[in-house]
Image: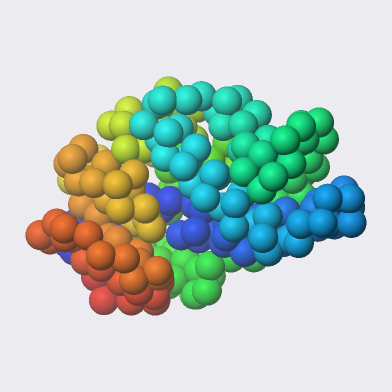
Amino acid sequence: MKNIKHIFFDLDNTLWDYRRNAEIAVRKVYREFGIEKEYGYGFDEFYDHYYKVNESLWEKYRNAEITRPELQSRRFPESFKSLGIQNPDFAVEFELRFMAEVSDGKHLVPNAIEILEYLKGKYHIHIITNGFPKTTDYKINNSILKDFVETVVTAESAGAPKPNPKAFSAGLKESGAKLSESVYIGDDWEADIVGATEFGMKAIFFNPLSENHLWIEGVPVVDHLTEIKNYL
């Protein structure tokens, strides 16, 4: 890719390993609340329900069907009810404990540091994320990511989540980057890649889960972050 000066990354599951950090956090809080002992449901059984509910709610959030507070207030109550616990009065406190724990997660996606070290000095590095402002700040500033990232735009600061063009426009405005000199890298096909390309930005799809999509011509697909070196 020629004439690129600014690289915009997604955060969760592109650089910061949300899947791993979230599972560790939920497991810890689940154990603290003694739910298996109280209700008889093992963690793995619960996490299957939680994962599906959480993914569904995040999709609704990206599509502007629900707000951030609605997502946060619904995901654990609906997960516990799906599991079979009909009146999970503890779900609000569970959410608060989860947010505190997951924000402290330190695990990054494999090879994240290697690719950032490769890119630093050659390009300006930025983040556009649908993550929540407070947790995004913790994720970056409590990890080595702070040494690489110049600007950060969240869905709330942009006024809309990806794939809404407002998110990408806010990223350009915050960074001072030109659209023609920018590329977006992310792991969510719809929010990151379709959103970026429809906005007119070049994109690279990070595909660690080997997903299949109707590929967009001119959009490279990489299974590992280090493969980005082939294009930048």
Quadrant in the rendering for residue 90: top right
The residue shown at (68%, 55%) is 46
The residue shown at (62%, 43%) is 82
Using the image, determine if residue 154 lies above or below residue 47. above
Q: Position of residue 203 (x, y in %)?
A: 25, 55
Q: Position of residue 89 (x, y in %)?
A: 81, 31
**Horizontal placement of 182 versus 150: left or right?**
left
What is the count of numbered marks?
0
The residue shown at (56%, 32%) is 71
Quadrant in the rendering for residue 133: top right
Which residue is at the front of the view, 171 or 163? Answer: 163
The colour style of the image is: rainbow
**Horizontal placement of 125 versus 131: left or right?**
left
Which residue is at the front of the view, 192 or 60? Answer: 60
Using the image, determine if residue 52 lies above or below residue 163. below
Q: Position of residue 205 (x, y in %)?
A: 30, 61
Q: Position of residue 1 (x, y in %)?
A: 18, 63
Which residue is at the front of the view, 26 or 178? Answer: 26
Q: Is residue 7 visible?
A: no
**Horizontal placement of 91 versus 193: left or right?**
right
Q: Is residue 166 visible?
A: yes
In the orientation shown, which residue stands out farthest toward the left?
217
Q: Quadrant of the C terminus?
A: bottom left
Using the image, determine if residue 183 lies above or below residue 114. above
The residue shown at (34%, 44%) is 191
